[in-house]
Amino acid sequence: MVPAVLRHGCLFAGKLALDDPVEKHLPEFHHQWLTVEQDSHHLLLKQPKRPITVRDILSHTSGLPFASAAEQPTLDLLPLRVGALSYAMTPLVFEPGSKYQYSNAGINVQHAGFPGNGGSSFEAFRKAAAEEFGKKGR
């Protein structure tokens, strides 16, 4: 919940915009690829029509898969920042904004790389939230 509150504050403070490309905050997402066809013998990729946006990540319409190959056999072995980097190397499963699909990858990306989070520890989140609410409460 704390990361969501901080993101909300960052939206209002102008540090984060819903239509920002994710690559603005995580440059590794520049030149993301999209899976067009895949079978046991080949994988055909193309560039998506547009980059993933913050809005896409927050609304589960980014096209990111549920998890990356690096997260096998379980989702919780990697630090968030490393997991987020693995998603940047994983092709999208559909065009950003074209449909809804719940994605742990999207949740991890927003926690790892958006302003107000930056891959920080929970303690850093708590301090930032306390500071933000202290400013607003006066």
Image (spheres, rainbow, N blue to C red):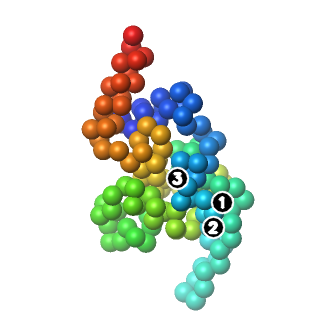
Q: Secondary structure at mark 1?
A: loop
Between 73 and 129, the one nearer to me in the picture: 129
* Residue under label 1: 95
**How far across and down, in percent of the image, does residue 44 sit?**
65, 78
For marks 1 and 3, give the CA distance: 19 Å
Q: Amino acid at mark 2?
A: Leu
Q: Secondary structure at mark 2?
A: strand
Query: Which quarter of the figure has residue 126?
Result: top left
- Residue furthest toward the right? 49
Q: Secondary structure at mark 3?
A: loop
**How far across and down, in percent of the image, does residue 11 sit?**
54, 32
Left or right of 52 in this view: 10: left
Can residue 37 be seen from the camera position used here?
Answer: yes
Crowding at dot 1, Cα within 10 Å, few <14 / some 14-19 / many 20+, comes out as many
Residue at 57 percent across and 68 percent down: it is: 91
Residue at 59 percent across and 37 percent down: it is: 17
- Residue 136 tag number: none
Left or right of 7 in this view: 22: right
**How far across and down, in percent of the image, does residue 84 sit?**
44, 58
- Residue furthest toward the bottom? 41
Between 99 and 89, the one nearer to me in the picture: 89
Crowding at dot 2, Cα within 10 Å, few <14 / some 14-19 / many 20+, comes out as many
Quarter of the figure that contains the N terminus: top left
- Residue 34 tag number: 2
Labels 1 and 3 touching (C-beta < 8 A) = no
Q: Which of the two labelled residues, at mark 2 and mark 1, occupies the earlier sequence position?
A: 2
* Residue under label 3: 26
For marks 2 and 3, give the CA distance: 18 Å
Q: Amino acid at mark 1?
A: Glu
5 vs 79: above or below = above
Can residue 93 be seen from the camera position used here?
Answer: no
For marks 2 and 1, give the CA distance: 7 Å
